[in-house]
Image (cartoon, coloured by chain):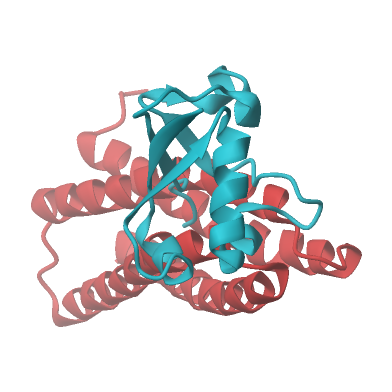
Chain colours: A cyan, B red
Amino acid sequence: MGEVTVIVPVLLRPYTDGASQLTAEGETLGDVFRTLCERFPGLAARLYNENGDFRSFLQVFVESDDIRTRLGMETPVSDGAQITILQALAGG
Amino acid sequence: MSPPSPETVLRIAHVVSASMWVGAVFMASMIDWPVIERINPSFPFELIVGQGRRVFPAVYLAIFLIGATGVGLIWLSPPLEGSALAALALKGAAFAVMAGITLYGTLVSWPKLQLATAAEAKLLYGAYIRRAYVVFGCGVLGLAVGIWLGEA
């Protein structure tokens, strides 16, 4: 089980006690986010929809790989990997 | 029939761009949202964010084209009369309000919306739609003044 770093976007920091980076352990991306949501209870409502699924329009990268091109939340994470959450540019 | 002059080409691009922007705002705020709101007890994130992502490049392309063609039209036929200058100032002000509200939506409203709970999203999107009415009103004003300015 590897320890990874998650880069937290500015708008999520109120739910991570202001932290801009978090570390967590897990074998898959889903494990990592579950661990973080247990540690920061306010985070789950921001990352998951009402059905408990990860919000599909949030883009998550493991290193430089978009998880939609990998295995989604089942994407394995290696020790020391960096995970980035990006929001879509939208609206007008 | 002679080919269109550069001024005509710029004018067509200017009006089409403005129509695309105003039409997108009209469709999203006055046609789509009232129906979506009525049939969805919760906030339809996938639909709204999907729509927002699709509208983003079109609207910013329209803003760029309106600005660039507007500058080109002023350069080709500068308004000389007081009334034409006043009309141009009115169009410029309407454009500035529209672009400002759009930029605020992209930089502030949409990032918040993507991380909001359903209840928060309804409030955020409601405020966004009210600002869209202002964008629509300014767009119609700009188009009307532009048509008058083109004939003057």
| Along the viewing direction, whichever of B47 and A81 lies nearer the viewer | A81
**Residue B151 locus on image (x, y percent):** 34, 61
Name the outermost residue toward the front: A1
**Which residue shows up at 60% across the image and 53% down it?**
A47
Is residue B102 visible to us here? no
Residue B60 appears left or right of B121: left
**Residue A70 locus on image (x, y percent):** 56, 18
Residue A14 appears left or right of B8: right
**Residue B124 locus on image (x, y percent):** 58, 75
**Which residue shows up at 36% across the image and 43% down it?**
B61
| Along the viewing direction, whichever of B106 and B6 lies nearer the viewer | B106
**Which residue shows up at 57% across the image and 25% down it?**
A68
**Which residue shows up at 64% across the image and 75% down it?**
B120
Which image quarter: residue B113? bottom right
**Residue A35 locus on image (x, y percent):** 58, 48
The C terminus of chain B, quarter of image: bottom left
Is residue A37 visible to us here? yes
Q: How many marks?
A: 0
Examine the rendered structure and indicate whether residue B74 appears above or below residue B104.
Answer: above
| Along the viewing direction, whichever of A25 and B2 lies nearer the viewer | A25
The N terminus of chain B, quarter of image: top left
